Image (cartoon, grey):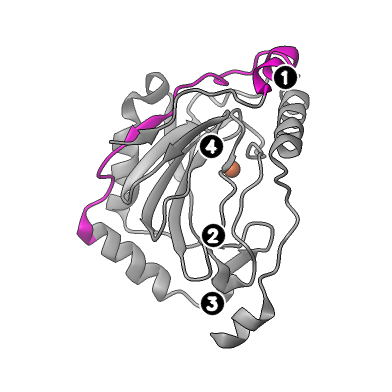
Amino acid sequence: MIEQKPLSRKSGYQEVVDRTGFVEHQDFNPIIVDNVFTEEQINHIYNTINNEPLDKVKVAPWGGQASWFSTHFRGDIEARISDIILDVVDGDLELRGDYSFARYSEEFGYKTKLFPHADKREKPRFLMDVQLRADTDWAIVIEDTEYVLKNNQGIIFSGTNQVHWREPKDIGPHARVDMIFFNLEFKDGRGFEPHHSDSITQRSRYLRDFYQLEDTPRPVDRKFNELQ
Ligand SMILES: [Fe+2]
């Protein structure tokens, strides 16, 4: 089972949440899903990304992360996710092909990290993060509660309405953390509350200051690069 630390609200964050007005799904209890894919499906995913031309891979220096944005996988991969989300939020969510494979690794030239933020989209989205393979434990923090995924586990939460980040941790020069991010849309096309953007901005700002986690890229030591 998932290793979940108890709701801590250790930063005084709750006061900021209360002050900035209720945001739909801010208290959604993230759902953990075990055994997301079969071994054969995981092999298919890796075969697909390993055969993509490098110009399809986009590096995000602020996170030490590379994304395969336009890579799509076999139909049964998407069907599996659609199946899993049937009961989430009263069956209101659907996957419409919006997903990407991402790898955190210093091999891209930057320290791996993720600062407190909520995903910027035109409309509310839930997110299913699936950890395919990781060489190290690296907690995902959602609304100040930490979740440590195991390989082939997923976590579902509101990517646009719940502030999330990664625990500050040096995963080291040789570790890789491979994820797929599935963006889930609302069938009813609902929008945000008028105060959404202001609330999320203030909450993210508070947490970035508290944990001293920013979006500034941190290049890795050139000596390390030259050794590769
Ligand atoms: Fe995000």
Mark 2 close to ligand 1, CB under 8 Å = no
Is 113 one of the magenta-colored residues?
Answer: no
Residue linked to disc 4 = 141
- The quarter in which the N terminus is drawn is top left
Q: In which quarter of the image is residue 200?
A: top right
Q: Within the image, what quadrant is residue 159 found in?
A: top right
Residue 84's place in the image compared with 8, above or below, is below
Q: Name the residue under label 3.
A: 54
Residue ID for mark 2 = 69
Q: What residue type is labelled 3?
A: Leu
Q: Earlier in the sequence, mark 4 or mark 1?
A: 1
| Residue extent of the magenta highlight | 12-40
Classify 10 Å Cα crowding around label 2: few (below 14), some (14-19), many (20 and above): some
- Kindly identify the amino acid type of the residue bearing the numbered disc 2: Phe
Tell me where residue 94 sits by quadrant. Answer: top left
Side of 165 where 75 appears, left or right: left
Nearer the observer, 204 or 44: 204
Which of the two marks, 2 or 1, is nearer to us in this view? 1
Q: What amino acid is labelled 4 in the image?
A: Val
Q: Viewed as shown, does residue 127 lie left or right of 106?
A: left
Q: Tell me if mark 3 has few (under 14), some (14-19) or many (20+) residues whose alpha carbon lies within 10 angstroms of its own.
A: few
> Nearest the camera: 92 or 206?
206
> What residue do we see at 72% from left, 35% from top?
210
Residue with the mark numbered 1: 16
Q: Does the magenta stretch include residue 21?
A: yes
Looking at marks 4 and 2 on the same chain, the residue that comes earlier in the sequence is marked by: 2
Q: The disc labelled 1 sits on which kind of residue?
A: Val
Label 4 or label 3, whichever comes before in sequence order: 3
Q: Is mark 4 on a helix, strand or loop?
A: strand
